[in-house]
Image (tube, grey):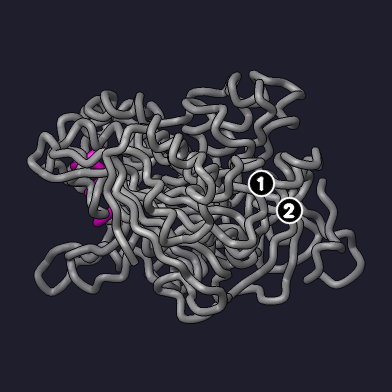
Amino acid sequence: MSQFKFSVGLGLLWAACQTAGAQTSDCAAFAQAAPHGMSLQTEWIAGDTQRPPGMNAGPMLIAHCKLTGRMQERMGQDGKAYHIGFEMRLPTAWNGRLLYQGGGGNDGVVRPAVGPQAAPGYALNRGFAVVTTDAGHQGPTADFGFDPIARTDNAYNAHDKVAVTAKELVQRYYSKPADRAYFIGCSGGGRQGMMFTQRFPSYFDGVIAMAPAMRVSKGATIAAAWDTQALQAIAPTGANGKPVLSQALSEKDLGLVRQSILSQCDALDGVTDGVVSNPAACSFDVSTLQCTGAKTDACLAPGQVDALKKMFGGAKTSSGQPLYFSWPWDPGMGHPANDWRMWKLGNSATEKANSRHVFLMEDALQGYFVTPPDRSLSIYQFNFDRDPLRMDAHAWIFNTAEDVQLKGFQARSGKLMFIHGLADPIFSPHEMIDYYQRLRAHNGARTEDFAKLFLVPGMGHCAGGAATDSIDGLGALVDWVEKGQAPQSLVANGTAVFPGRSRPLCAYPQHAHYKGTGDTENASNFSCR
């Protein structure tokens, strides 16, 4: 591995690249083509010798050149050093396409640029050049929020710079531009995908936004505080007399809710199979589970019923004004393979909660989503009348829920695909449905020409749960962009919970319905209604 830093003018660099052999596919030599102001490392990875970092199983990677770069190095207002970091992997067997792999959480780390959300396998192994970024700051906490430039980099600026740089590096490495450019990301990465369609609509031909964090800086984070406070209020106390959040609902309590939803709504899609594929027809009432006497495993205590009704009804002000969306009663929330517990409750046996709402969302709330940052603001003490106003200053540059015109993206025939789990514990599927309905209200019938929504019964946040959660959305997107084949459904396969099962994910508002004959584990025996 070698590292080079250059301050050559772009004009001289371009001239040098035109000389015979100057622009080469040799990985080590390519570092010398680093644009002005960029630090670049290169590493040649032979085929079938490595898996992505942290992966001990699964497919080996094909032969490719790995680039690790940084640009726009600076000293922040908070006294910390910053740069925009990125990784890019350029396969020898290139298919002519570029994939931008979205991030997630608070970002701050450069993830392996292999395209892991391109099931099955990796986008890199399918021939895509892939790029990722840390979004302009280093470290996964929200401490970067104390620097105003880092805030802007994370919201959009770093992504602009990395997308432009990636296209330039592709041009130099392969001596031709990418034929097509795609984006795929979930959660914060889904928000980034929506951001590109709005702020930089010419950059990508196709975008997949999974469970997008479209209102996270004034919406889903408020809901996290709302749910945490509702559960904390009913949590039993530990030996020291303090509430233990994780014990507000036991595994048996969650399993009871799951089985009750299934009993009422599972068969509405024509087959009893452990999922609710027709959520619009499901009208579950958790009040029916309330104990009439002492609490047992067969019923819920009144406080538990009230907390669940409060949570699934959505966050509100004291006057009843909605601050976020309600949630569907999907049975996936009660399955141990789903991440619902770890987001809402955690599993800590002490008063020190480890739910992701507490340790992840509170960090972002304090450091990034309120202006100015406030490390004293507790998710347990969030005031739903006063504190949302502190989120306005940042929400307008970060959130992506308002633009339903997408004029620039439509003008260049861009294609936008949404995928969202119906048991997602952090971003409500009702929020996703609301955005898509507003798209249709504004754009009418032509919405189907550029945007599709696919809901995944039972799936948690981005993947996992009691669901068919292995989905080749990228393949369908490529066919839509390059062949004009708009997907009316996606075939999804089961993984841990339903191995061997396949189901069609139908374009909203349709749902998968069993035809009445044939193997119920085979997608071909279901139709979209």
Q: Secondary structure at mark 2?
A: strand
Residue 280 versus residue 148: which sits nearer the camera? Answer: 148
Residue under pointer 2: 490
Q: Secondary structure at mark 1?
A: strand
Crowdedness near tag 1: few (<14), some (14–19) or many (≥20) residues, C-alpha within 10 Å: many
On the image, the x and y values in percent for residue 527 come to 85, 53
On the image, the x and y values in percent for residue 345 come to 33, 62
Q: Three-letter amino acid code at disc 1?
A: Phe
Crowdedness near tag 2: few (<14), some (14–19) or many (≥20) residues, C-alpha within 10 Å: some
Which label is found at residue 454? 1
> In the picture shown, does residue 430 fall above or below 240?
above
On the image, the x and y values in percent for residue 328 come to 55, 47
- Residue 348 is drawn in which quadrant? bottom left
Tell whether position 133 is magenta.
no
> In the picture shown, does residue 179 fall above or below 406?
below
Task: Name the residue: 57% across, 55% down.
Answer: 330
Which label is found at residue 129? none
Do the numbered discs 2 and 1 sit on residues whose CB atoms are within 8 Å?
yes
Sequence-wise first label, 2 or 1:
1
Q: Three-letter amino acid code at disc 2?
A: Leu
Task: Name the residue: 18% across, 39% down.
Answer: 74
Mark 2 or 1, closer to the camera: 2
Task: Name the residue: 28% across, 28% down.
Answer: 394
Q: Main secondary structure of the magenta part?
A: helix
On the image, the x and y values in percent for residue 342 come to 37, 64
Task: Name the residue: 36% across, 56% down.
Answer: 68
| Label 2 to label 1: alpha-carbon separation | 8 Å
Tell whether position 360 is magenta.
yes
Boundaries of the magenta span: 358-368
Residue 319 visible in the displayed image:
yes
